């Protein structure tokens, strides 16, 4: 009986995965609502947006946006008031970019979100911070150094900051 239920479930998943409209939703069994825990910070935006769009729990909004937003808030006491102010501006900028993107989907949220990092960091005063502060900010997400997109974005931020100081 268990095998029949499992087989039925797997067939159902394959059918859903084959449908382009449902492919994204079939990636995760739990809804974004189940994956969300609201904490009253700006980071709640990512849960609200994931719920609004019907995104799977393993998509950018929850697995990157919310995760790292919360990590930086949790660790804010490690930074000076000036650095905390820059980080708050960066968070607001990233949320605003996603919030103001017309026709945003679960798939393009990652593209919009990732591409927003460079200008949000540069425009929010990141380049004016001491190199050690910049390093500590990047270090909080150190496991992302293996992510090619993140390395590319970090490199662009570094290049633009270097140009600003010339």
Image (cartoon, rainbow, N blue to C red):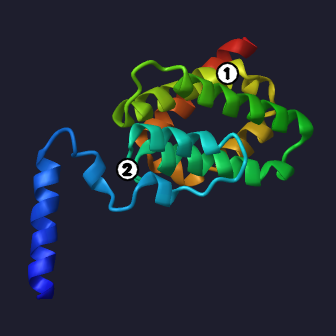
Pinpoint residue 109: horizontal percent, then vertical percent.
Answer: 43, 32
Question: Is residue 49 in sight in this rendering?
Answer: yes
Q: Residue at x 71, y 13 (%)?
A: 164
* Kind of element beneath mark 1: helix
Q: Residue at x 54, y 42 (%)?
A: 48
Pinpoint residue 106: horizontal percent, then vertical percent.
Answer: 38, 37
Q: Residue at x 41, y 37 (%)?
A: 53
The image quadrant that residue 12 belongs to is bottom left
Q: Residues within 10 Å of mark 2 (few under 14, many from 20)?
A: many
Taking the view exactly as shown, the residue that stands out farthest to the bottom is 1
Q: Nearer the viewer, mark 1 or mark 2?
A: 2
Taking the image as shown, residue 82 lies to the left or right of residue 46, namely: right
**On screen, 11 above or below 78?**
below
Residue carrying label 1: 122
**On screen, 23 above or below 109?**
below
Pinpoint residue 87: horizontal percent, then vertical percent.
Answer: 75, 35
Residue carrying label 2: 56
Q: Quadrant of the C terminus?
A: top right
Taking the image as shown, residue 54 lies to the left or right of residue 82, namely: left
């Amino acid at each position: 009986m268990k095998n029949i239920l499992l087989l039925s479930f797997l067939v159902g998943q394959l059918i859903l995965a084959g449908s382009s409209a449902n492919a994204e939703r079939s990636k995760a069994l739990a809804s974004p609502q189940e994956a969300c825990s609201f904490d009253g910070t700006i980071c709640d935006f990512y849960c609200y947006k994931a719920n609004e769009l019907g995104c799977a729990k393993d998509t950018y909004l929850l697995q990157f946006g919310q995760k790292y937003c919360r990590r930086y808030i949790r660790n804010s006491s490690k930074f000076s008031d000036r650095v905390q102010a820059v980080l708050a501006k960066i968070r607001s900028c990233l949320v605003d970019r996603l919030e103001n993107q017309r026709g945003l989907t679960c798939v393009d949220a990652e593209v919009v979100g990732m591409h927003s990092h460079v200008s949000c960091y540069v425009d929010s005063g990141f380049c004016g911070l001491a190199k050690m502060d910049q390093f500590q900010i990047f270090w909080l997400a150190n496991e992302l150094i293996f992510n090619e997109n993140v390395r590319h974005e970090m490199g662009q931020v570094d290049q633009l900051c270097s140009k600003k100081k010339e």
